[in-house]
C-alpha cells in the first residue's frame, strides 16, 4: 500500500535515522527525546535545513519568523530540548525528565507501525488478538490513540504520514471499538481525530481527506 510522505516529513526521517532502530525504541522515552534534541541542536548549528519542520512547528521562538531567520537565530541545547518536548506533547523538558525510566508500550508502537505502513491485515490481526489497542493511548504527552495518528497532525513529525487507505484503516479501528470522540492533548487539548485530520495538509495532499473526514465524522458529537 502506498503511503504519502511530505518532503519535510521525509527530511525528519533522514535527520534521525535511528528512530526505527529497535534498541533506540526500547530505551526510556526521556532518553529517546534527549537524543533527538542533541541531533536537532547539532544540525541547526551546521545550518542543516532538515530541522525546519520540527523547529518551525514546535520551537516557541520560531513564531512569526521565516526559516532563514530561524536558522540564523541562536538555538541552544535547552531550546532543542524544549522543541522536542513540545513535539511529543509535553509542556516542557521537566515533564519529559520526570518520566524517569518509563518506556513505550511496544504493543501499541507495533500496531502504529503497521497502521502507518497501510497494512490492514497485520493491524487487523493484532486488533483481533488485543482489542484494547483500539482505545489505547500513546505514552507520549499528546496521549494520541491510533485513530488520532491517522489525522497526521500534532503528533511527532516523523509519524505525520498518510497511508492512501487511511479511510479503510479508520473503519477497521472503529469496528474494533475505537472512539471517534476520544480527545488528545495537542494544540491545547480536546482534539478529536476528525479535528486533526480536517486541519492537516497531509491527507489533503494525499487526496483522501474527504473520505477520511467522512469516516471520522460519522456519528461524532
Image (cartoon, grey):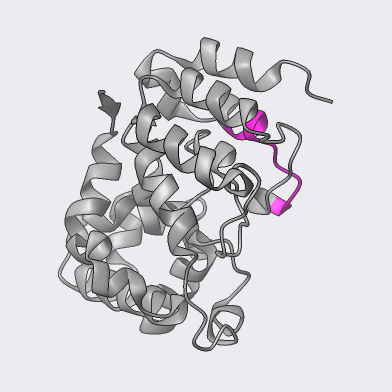
Task: Judge from the rendering whether residue 213 lies leftward or rightward of residue 65; answer left or right.
Answer: right
Observer able to see residue 75: no
Residue 122, quarter of picture:
top left
Quadrant in which the N terminus appears: top left
Q: Residue 6: x, y in percent? A: 29, 34
Q: How many marks?
A: 0
Q: Residue 45: x, y in percent? A: 21, 73
Q: Residue 186: x, y in percent? A: 63, 51
Task: Judge from the rendering whether residue 158 lies leftward or rightward of residue 42; answer left or right.
Answer: right
Observer able to see residue 174: yes
In this view of the protein, which residue sits in the foreground, 116 or 108? 108
Q: Which residue extends farthest right?
A: 221
In this view of the protein, which residue sits in the foreground, 60 or 94? 94
Q: Which residues are magenta?
A: 188-196
Task: Judge from the rendering whether residue 190 lies leftward or rightward of residue 215; answer left or right.
Answer: right
Task: Judge from the rendering whether residue 186 lies leftward or rightward of residue 103; answer left or right.
Answer: right
Q: Residue at x 66, y 31 (%)?
A: 195
Quadrant in which the C terminus appears: top right
Q: Is residue 171 magenta?
A: no
Q: Residue at x 53, y 33 (%)?
A: 151
Q: Residue 136: x, y in percent? A: 62, 52
Residue 165, quarter of picture:
top left
Q: Above or below — where is 133 with respect to 213? A: below
Q: Residue at x 29, y 69 (%)?
A: 40
In this view of the protein, which residue sits in the foreground, 68 or 149? 149
Q: Above or below — where is 68 with respect to 212? A: below
Amino acid at each position: 500500500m502506498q503511503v504519502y510522505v511530505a518532503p519535510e516529513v521525509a527530511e525528519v526521517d533522514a535527520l534521525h535515522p535511528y528512530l526505527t532502530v529497535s534498541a533506540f525504541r526500547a530505551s526510556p522515552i526521556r532518553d529517546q527525546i534527549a537524543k533527538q534534541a542533541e541531533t536537532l541542536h547539532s544540525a541547526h548549528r551546521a545550518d542543516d535545513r532538515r530541522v525546519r519542520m520540527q523547529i518551525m512547528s514546535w520551537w516557541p521562538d520560531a513564531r512569526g519568523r521565516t526559516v532563514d531567520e530561524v536558522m540564523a537565530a541562536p538555538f541552544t541545547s535547552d531550546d532543542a530540548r524544549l522543541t522536542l518536548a513540545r513535539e511529543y506533547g509535553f509542556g516542557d523538558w521537566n515533564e519529559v525528565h520526570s518520566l524517569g525510566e518509563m518506556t513505550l508500550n511496544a504493543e501499541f508502537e507495533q500496531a502504529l507501525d503497521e497502521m502507518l505502513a497501510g497494512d490492514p491485515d497485520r493491524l487487523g490481526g493484532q486488533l483481533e488478538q488485543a482489542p484494547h489497542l483500539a482505545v489505547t493511548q500513546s505514552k507520549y504527552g499528546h496521549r494520541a490513540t491510533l485513530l488520532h495518528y491517522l489525522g497526521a497532525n500534532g503528533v511527532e513529525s516523523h509519524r505525520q504520514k498518510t497511508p492512501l487507505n487511511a479511510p479503510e484503516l479508520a473503519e477497521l479501528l472503529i469496528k474494533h471499538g475505537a472512539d471517534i470522540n476520544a480527545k488528545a492533548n495537542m494544540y491545547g487539548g480536546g482534539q478529536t481525530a476528525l479535528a486533526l485530520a480536517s486541519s492537516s495538509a497531509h491527507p489533503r495532499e494525499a487526496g483522501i481527506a474527504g473520505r477520511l473526514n467522512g469516516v471520522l465524522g460519522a456519528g461524532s458529537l
